[in-house]
Amino acid sequence: MKKIDRRFFLKAMGVTAATLAVGTSKTIASDPAQEVGDLPELKGILFDATKCKGCHGCEYDCAWEHGLTEPDVIDEDEHRKTDHTRRTVVNKYNTSKGKVFVKTQCMNCNDPACGTACLTEAMYKTKDGSVIWREDKCMGCRYCMVSCPFEMPKFEYHSTNPKIQKCDMCYHLQQQGEMPACAYNCPNEALYFGTRRELILEANKRIAENPDLYYPHIYGEHEAGGSSWMYISPVPFEELGFNTKIQNKSYPALTKGFISSIAPVDILLPATLLGIYEATKKPKSGTHEKEELS
Amino acid sequence: MNKAAPQPLYLDNRENNTFRFILNELKPKGKIFTPFNIISIPVIITGLIIMYIRFTQGIGSVTNLSQEVPWGLWIGFDVVTGVAFAGGAYVLVFMVYILNLEKYRPIVRVTVLNGFLAYLFYSAALLLDLGRPLNIINVIIGNNFGVSSVLFLVGWHFLLYMLALLLEFSPAIAEWLNARKAHKFLSGLTLAAVIFGITLSVLHQSGIGALFLMAKDKIHPLWYNSYMPLMFVVSSVFGGISMVILEGSISSKVFEYQLDKDHHKQHDSILHGLSKICAVGMFVYFFMQILVFVHQQNMPYLFSPMGYWFMLELLGFVLLPMLMFFQSYRTHNIGMIKVASVLTLLGIVLNRMNISIIAFQYDAAMRYVPTWQEFIVTFTIIFIEIWVLRWIITRMPVLRKSPDWAKSNH
């Protein structure tokens, strides 16, 4: 009786497990749209270098929106970098196809290195796509700056309560259903705000419709695992001062192996050490040692 | 200072009034105007002033840190290098408490004390470098756990390891206070503290290497590799042991009056054993470096200024001291062991500074050079640490033998 019971039980278990396994795989396979729909729709901005006229208007809008000092564009040929006083800059590059203007700011990566680096989750990737910095959590260790491949988080070194300055695609405006200040105000429509999916479609469309005008690559589609900011340009991106050493895999992937080995080591090493201790323990070591010492 | 004789009198007093005893112990013993004091006191005072400026005018007012190089001397030397130097504590407790190598027991306490103080003061250096130090509480109270962060792991393992070290050292404090019951209890905890201490050490030593894994494009390919965590652990073994050799040689001269007569012979035999560990550890490390070098096809980088710098580090400060350790082990040359340990330590400094500062952002237009203030603060931290170390060694049974009542608890 008992045996049959057990066999029946096991059989039932097996059938249930098989049903569950087949069932789940079926739902995924039968409805690919469902799978995509489950992913959060990340927002992003597409920068079209063929449309930017270099008016620097977005620099002013950004500074105004975030309460930063007004930008001073003195030398057009100087390649400026963002810093703690400016979250974005537009620089002019003399390329094989004449002068091209490029806007630089934090890329708001899909899987940001800064977010993984941050030990207090002050750097945080929101569901909308923005990588935000949260003042009440940050302890100012600057590990985000060490990790970021684009070197975008900027630190206020001369403040006693320093902040990290970087583009967060105007997260506070997006919360109210508005567009980021730069994209809203751009007079030349060089900045196009939308979901990442829309942006990639739009970028591919522009490249396909004008193959002579564009260099066939979307910078930010795959770089560093993809980012919310993406670029299309008339020339190869190394001519525009872009870091082309960036890997296509996300940067946090580099530490995943290490992170996942921590728990096994934390559990297995003490046990091993205890084993070695027991194995090497001398019988009556206490009395032996006493004799030696006295 | 050089009087160990009135010890028995003390013992009687302390039982009557612990508070008065501690008050009495707080008073300085020995001469004030020693060469070390004359150098260290002005440095410490200057350093404290610089720290005050740092907290009132921001980190940028005293350092040369920039947006490109966010970690400088305070992290690169005080923390990254210092932790490797303090690695001797976990290696030695492994040898003595886990492998039961009784020969090394006489130096275990001083090494653990050194390790504990090193960690304590490097955490202080870390706090100086934090822009918003009060928020460090977020990491501890779990306001937000960034569990995928390597730094989070390093921070927690660091903190817990300090506790483990304190537990490992606590019997000495109990002996000093003549607290017999506490001594028995604390001695019982030693093995647990040792086992967890070693585990925590292995993970945070490697974690410090793993900190730089995401800086793949910033560190020169001769130094960057995915095995950095492993390299950091292995180099912390011989780096830590070299520190034990050097520090033991210095303290056995400075605190000679604390040691008994057969110490010297014993100490030479200990150094001899340690030199072998260093030699083998360095061989493993050197082999790993060569393996990575070949595997990553780094040959094209070798004949450039950075390549020569790399060769100097690897040949001059790893291979050479390794051969010296092997040779001194065969010929029983204690002097050579000491020279080799100094070279090894310099090699560790070079390696850690290269990864965190020199080969970091190696192609940046503006190179980072520390300000004199950063150096002074670094020295201040080291000097205060030595002051505290000296204070403890002159009072507690660290180098000298434990009181007779304490021996049965071991």
Image (cartoon, grey):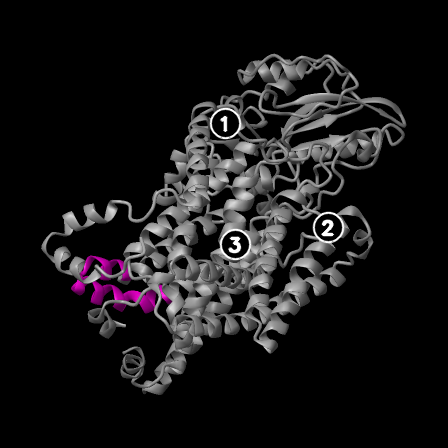
Q: Which residue is mark 2?
A: B309
x and y, in percent, of residue B235 in the image: 57, 61
**Residue B176 lies in the magenta stretch:** yes
Q: Which residue is mark 1?
A: A163
Q: Nearer the viewer, mark 1 or mark 2?
A: 2
Mark 1 residue element: loop
Hey, what amino acid is under mark 1?
Lys
Query: Residue drawn at (59%, 51%), measured in percent from left and top?
Result: B349
- Location of residue B57 with respect to B179 vertically, above or below: above
Mark 1 surroundings within 10 Å by alpha-carbon count, few (fewer than 14), some (14 through 19), many (20 or more): many
Chain on which label 2 sits? B
Q: Are marks 2 and 3 in contact (CB under 8 Å)?
A: no
Label 3 packing within 10 angstroms: few (<14), some (14-19), many (20+)? many
Whether labels 1 and 2 belong to a single chain: the reply is no
Q: Which residue is disc 3 drawn over?
A: B207
What distance separates the C-alpha of mark 1 from that of mark 2? 36 Å
* Rendered residue at 52%/25% (across/down): B61
